[in-house]
Amino acid sequence: MADMKKAPPVIFPWEEKKKEYEKILGDEEIVKRLWEEFDMLAYMFIWFLVTAM
Amino acid sequence: MAEDMEKLYNKRMDRYLKANHREKPDKVPFRPFAAEAVGAFYGLNAQQVTHDVDQGMDAIVRMCKEFDIDATVSNMVYVWTGLTESYGTKYYGVPGIDLEVFESFQYREPRNDDEAWMRADDYDRFIEDPVEFTMNVWAPRISHYFEPPDSKNTWKNSLAWLKGGISFMYYGMKIGAHVQRMKEETGTVSCLSGALKAPFDVLADKYRGFRGISYDLHRQPDKVLKATEAVAPHMLNNALLGADPEKKVPISHWMHRGATGFFSEEVFKKYYWPTLREVTEEIWKAGYQTIYYAEGKWGKNLKYLRELPEESIIYHCDKDDIFEVHRILGEKFAISGGVPNDILAFGTPEDVRKRVKEVIETVGKDGGFLLDAEAIMQQDTKKENFKAMADACAEYGVYKN
């Protein structure tokens, strides 16, 4: 059986990216949201190459 | 949007959705999957529609204006070579470059393991992390420009990733605008959103190739199975991320190696079906139907599809006997198809009309049926036969409730 929850649509997780910031002075949520949105687009691009192109 | 066009669109959407959900709408929807045929109708060759997305989309709008089409694919020439050339794809024969301008793009299978995009000893790495493998191993192998991360970078590698991303976004924006144009200018529903591939098909089509997977089924069958299970969640994610936010139109699913000509029923049952069933059920739970566009003949494998929840799929019939398919699957799922492509290419309008009448009066009698060709229509489709199909659907497809 495949574990459908095993692989979220993420390449470079926010938790990993956050470690690169010494400190987030402002609203972390904005930074996180945008990071995750574009990471998801990159994920879509990778699978688009495989499944659609 | 003009009021009359909005009314027409809403009427067609209602018709399309009812048929997909096995109801009886006001008439049988005409839902053609026309690819290079559309270009041929309006004087465009395969190179033009495959490379120039604007010309291709203009032709689709012209088709929707000229014929009474309820729903159709926004761009059935699904490989946009503008994008695939930006990162130097190795596996396509491209019309106008490798092929004559009138030939459809060709997918070139690897001929041996050295040419395979995923080698026989790559399974463990693929199973561990299919995304990592695809980015760092598969992508460099399928491209003239991408480099693996452990090698020296080149400017062509950097540029290829940049251009690939840009063209992906560009194409997405084009499709979005085009779907809106279809709606506003022609009242035609864009019939699909989102894309599923069966995990086994992904391995067989794009990673190992047909020869490779055939050997693997004998030499390392456990790894084939584990690989389908590893990639299945990504196929689910991929399908849902592109799906209709309104949860109306279904997700597409082009089905290949589960056709009976390729592998045995045993292979279908053990390797092709389990993960496909699981992913389809998850898609259904998320609120979407999937169109099972089953290319070729599926014969004795059809019975397994009955395990799926009622209405979770629309089954598109290609080379199987559609009357038999209706008998096996019609109680649970809508059926589409009906008109053989060889009649559209070599027959007469009267042949087409006769066939449409026959299919509508049997398979379509109680609803849950959408008229289409058996397979994607390419440049050999005669325009007069396409017109006959559209006209016959309008004439014979009205349900007298």
Image (cartoon, coloured by chain):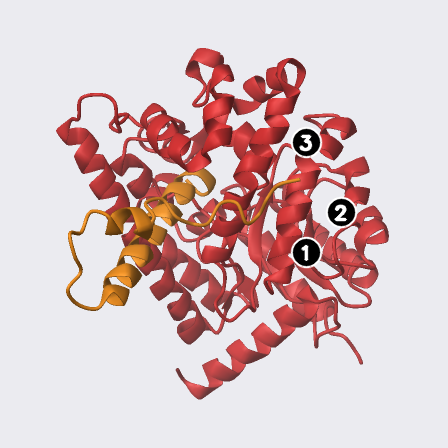
The residue at the point 68 percent across, 26 percent down is B262
User: Callout 3: 10 Å neighbours few (<14), some, many (20+)?
Assistant: many
Q: Nearer the viewer, residue B387 or B98?
A: B98
Q: CA distance from mark 1 to mark 3?
A: 20 Å
Q: Which residue is mark 2?
A: B305
Dot 1 and dot 3 residues touching (CB under 8 Å):
no
Q: Position of residue B162 (x, y in %)?
A: 21, 42
Give me the chain letter of mark 1.
Answer: B
Local SS, label 3 = helix
Q: Position of residue A17 (x, y in %)?
A: 26, 48
Vertical placement of B31 versus B376: above or below?
below
Dot 2 and dot 1 residues touching (CB under 8 Å):
yes
Residue extending furthest toward the bottom: B3
Horizontal side of B194 relative to B306 (left or right) equals left
Q: Which residue is mark 1?
A: B313
> Mark 1: which amino acid?
Ile
